Amino acid sequence: MKQYPAIDVRTDAPDLLLALVDDFGPTAVEERGDTTRIFFASTADRDTAERALAPRFEVAAVDVDDEDWARRSQENLKPITVGRITVVPGVASRFSHQVEPARDLTPMTIVIVPSMGFGTGHHATTRLCLAALQTIDLRGAVVLDVGTGSGVLAIAAARLGAARALGIDYDADAIQSARENLDLNADAAHVTFETVDLAARALPVADVLTANLTGALLVRSAATLLEAVRAGGTLILSGVQAHERDEVRAAFANAAVCWEREEDGWVGLAVKKP
């Protein structure tokens, strides 16, 4: 059974903790009362973060079974609704949840099975992306989802009318998770997922690009992300902590902000390429 390296950190200042740990490539965060569990892509990243945080926090290294994490998540997570989209964490929830859609809009349900590293839509950064997608007319558009994780944004784009959606991630486990989720969403047509390293090669060109990454990675990758969008296209940027907003905005200064929202200390931006 696959295990994921993580640390449990006791803190009453989670925002400070997340800011400090960002340099070590965390892949997911789970709030557990007064403890924050932070997951990493490798044991080496986890151990480096543990050493760096130990002088300031009470830190313990743990290895989490993916199956156990998914089981607990499905027990505890509830469906969430963003605009006309409701994301349910597992097939069983799909048949027990009634959705009250926005007036004059057809509701849609997306099933995402919890897995350690990949969001179900319950984190503010994913909710911001789902909200931003619904401000754009996606009918006939080509959408590129960078750092796709569970695939929820690519699947949502297809359900919202995109002609084609491609989700990419450097993590092969994420791509496997995304493909399994796609199988649970038969109404999402023309969606594909590929293992791609953002730093390794040029990205395919799209009309709309979503990038739910980290503030630091958005800044480093701004030129690459902008090149992947056609003139007049839109980039949706998330994973940005409020204190990182101005730095990320400066990295995309040539693109005009057409949407912005803050939620729980996280900022989502949509910018239009000239």
Image (cartoon, helix red, strand yellow):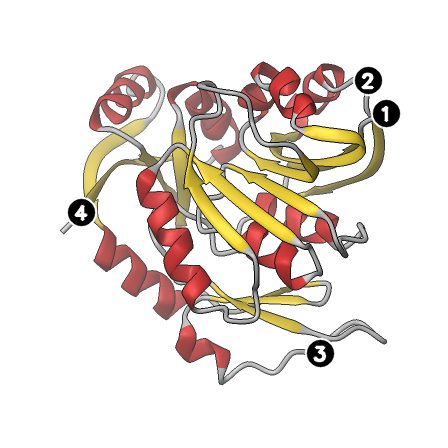
Q: Which mark is residue 2?
A: 4
In the image, 7 versus 171, the foreground residue is 171
Using the numbered discs, state the Cα–Cα distance from disc 2 to disc 1 in whole angstroms: 7 Å
Please indicate whether residue 144 sits to the left or right of residue 139 in the image.
Answer: left
Task: Of the two numbered discs 4 and 1 on the same chain, state the one appearing first in sequence.
Answer: 4
In the image, 273 versus 263, the foreground residue is 273
Residue 243 appears in the rendering:
no
Task: Of the two numbered discs 2 and 4 on the same chain, state the one appearing first in sequence.
Answer: 4
Using the numbered discs, state the Cα–Cα distance from disc 1 to disc 3 in whole angstroms: 37 Å
Q: Which residue is mark 1?
A: 274
In the image, 183 versus 212, the foreground residue is 183
Q: Is residue 266 above or below residue 178?
A: above
Task: Of the two numbered discs 2 and 3 on the same chain, state the one appearing first in sequence.
Answer: 3
Please indicate whether residue 202 sits to the left or right of residue 248 in the image.
Answer: left
x, y percent for residue 3: 19, 44
SS at badge 3: loop
Using the numbered discs, state the Cα–Cα distance from disc 4 to disc 1 in whole angstroms: 45 Å
